[in-house]
Image (cartoon, helix red, strand yellow):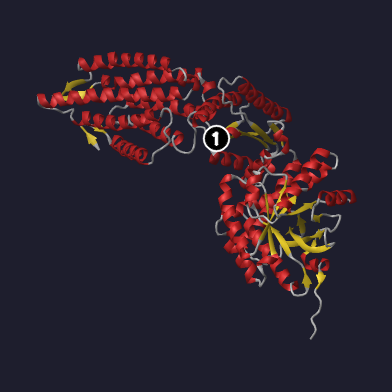
Amino acid sequence: MNFNGYNVAAEEVGLIFALAVFYLTVVSRPRQTAVFSVVFYGQLLSIVNIVFHMASILLLDFSTSLQGIVFRLVVMLYYVSYLGILIHLFSYVHLLSVKQRENRDFLNILIIFLAGAYMVTVGGVYITDSYIKIVNDRYVFTNLFNCNIIFAIVNLLIVTVSVVANREAIPKIVMKYLYLFIPVELVLLGIQLLYPKYVFLNVTYVLPFILCYIIFHSILFDEVTGCQNKLAFESHFCTLKAKNKQSTIIYIKLPKLEIVQNIELMDVVKSKMSTEIHSLETKNKRAYMYQINDYTYAIIFERITDFETKDTIKYVKKRLDETMMTWEYSNRPEYKMVVIDHAENIENMNVLSSYSGFLFEHEKLKKSNCYEAVHQDYLDCMEIRRIERVIVDIRNKDNLDDPRVIVYVQPIFDVLNGGYKNAESLMRLDVEGEIILPDIFIPLAERVGCVHTLTRIILNKVCKKIYEIQDYYVFDAVSVNVSLSEFMDYNLHDELIEIIKSNGVPCEKIRLEMTETMTSDEFDAIAHNMEEFNNAGVHFYLDDFGTGYSNLERIVSLPFKTIKFDKTLLYKSEDDPILMQLIQNMVDMFKNHGLVVLVEGVESEKQEILSIKLGFEYIQGYRFAKPVPVETVQEFFEKKPKRLA
């Protein structure tokens, strides 16, 4: 579209884009970062400036004094709003530098100086009407109408000098955008000066503000650290893998931030991390740092030589150690770091995510804040993933007769009667033909939320076996272990009792075992479920007594029937008379309260004699019986006498 000989089509398109982005900025509620207001008001000024720019062109051919006054007012507002845009762009680029962000007094002085120079230069042109002239009885703009563009070029050159001077304090990825942005801006401003009849000045400020919004106030970048996010990290990893490039990944986690979620501490840490990021990017030009979440960072770089890789790892650790040593605040965050060399061998991002989580739980990280993974770690992690897949599949299929859940039982010796009337059920997992022990798969099942399914399956299988032998053998009960996490469900008793009854088994034939470690938050739900189970006839064992941290009074207040002493207490008491006496006192106390006492893990004759001496009524362990398949449990029980016809 042409106004008075000027093509303003680009301005109209720019206005539409500016309005659309401003609307999205308002309704999408982007991250409120430290300099977000610069972008917000910059967008608003962009809309205002485009309107006044087009209005000044439209009103150029004025014929009355009133129209002339309105025209001059519009031109003044155009110049003023353009000054606002320059100040906002100038401020934003400067605030990309951590060093400049911490020294805003200098920035404010510089802005005042530039604004003053602009008002003197452009104001002089405006006051003297040097920006218009009469040609063939019509008003036209002179070349001085675009004096603000000349000032914009000067402003951009100053920004360039500042960027170059502070390049080490600006994130590397941001510098790449600036290297593209500044030359393009200079070219566009130059073309606008040469071809004033084609008006597209808005492109030089609308697009930068759009990019600022999209890049820094969406999900791509963190404004403070200059780090890209998890999605960008995944893209980088996949790109290196697709190109068959050898790569190394360094994960850095700040555990205190994960636990406390301290916003103020996060801001301080981000500021500190930004300094380390720029330092690293200067040290290794191929290294890029990403912010995975508020407390985890990842560094990835292409591996060229072993020396460079080791040097980079050493440098990162040194810088982090120095940062922690010189931390001037009381709430020092601390860090944990894992190094994954030859990351190109990792299948995909899901595997990488699992592997990094596995490494952060490594035993060596409990004694050191840095661990460099070895190939065996990867194999161990893949084994865990293999087991997890089976566990999740078991949960998803929810088949109470799933053959992959194998039930063993360990008979429990009755000291008084010299035989077996009870047994504990033990679970095994068949993973592609390999038998996995519970010490390995139960924690995994807890982590992926599948343990309740396993409990239901083993209970169902135990009940089937009890139903099969209950009319032919003499025994009291078989116990099943239940996770404390399951007791948080107030309706747990209904579900498990239904399984028992549906198999035609009296509830008295089932005992449930639970550990003593419980919190006050869990207590009410546990007490409720235990009461309901007891009312139905299901009694409880307190398992692993002596390894938890619960209040003894609280334990006694719950309706346990049997206290099961952990084997570690027995082992330690063999050479510790004081501990032996303490166990003796606890055994007597529980028996005086009407509770049954049992000790597990008895493996030798010496331990058997000691257990009997301490007064235990039941003994469980390899000394008497090893775990056997549930199908053979009846071999330990006495047969019922045959009834006469």
Residue 1: give x, y in percent of width and height.
Answer: 25, 38
Is 474 located above or below residue 81 in the figure?
below
Tell me if I can see residue 136 in this picture.
no
The image quadrant of residue 124 is top left
Tell me if I can see residue 372 in this picture.
yes
Residue at 63%, 55% in the rendered image: 450
In depth, the one of 213 and 357 nearer the eye is 357
Q: The C terminus lies in which quarter of the figure?
A: bottom right
Is 640 located above or below residue 395 in the figure?
below
Q: Give the total of numbered labels.
A: 1
- Left or right, 234 with respect to 156, comes to right
- Left or right, 46 with respect to 322, comes to left
Spot the residue most to the front.
592
Residue at 62%, 63% in the rendered image: 496
Say which element carries label 1.
helix
Give the amino acid at mark 1: Val
In depth, the one of 309 and 158 nearer the eye is 309
Residue at 85%, 48% in the rendered image: 610
Spot the residue most to the right.
605
In depth, the one of 628 and 65 nearer the eye is 628
The image quadrant of residue 155 is top left
Dot 1 crowding, Cα within 10 Å, few <14, some 14–19, many 20+: few
- Left or right, 283 with respect to 134, comes to right
Residue 503: give x, y in percent of width and height.
Answer: 66, 71
Instruction: Find disc 1 in the rendering and name its residue.
Output: 260
Residue 284: give x, y in percent of width and height.
Answer: 63, 26
Residue 359: give x, y in percent of width and height.
Answer: 68, 40
The image quadrant of residue 323 is top right
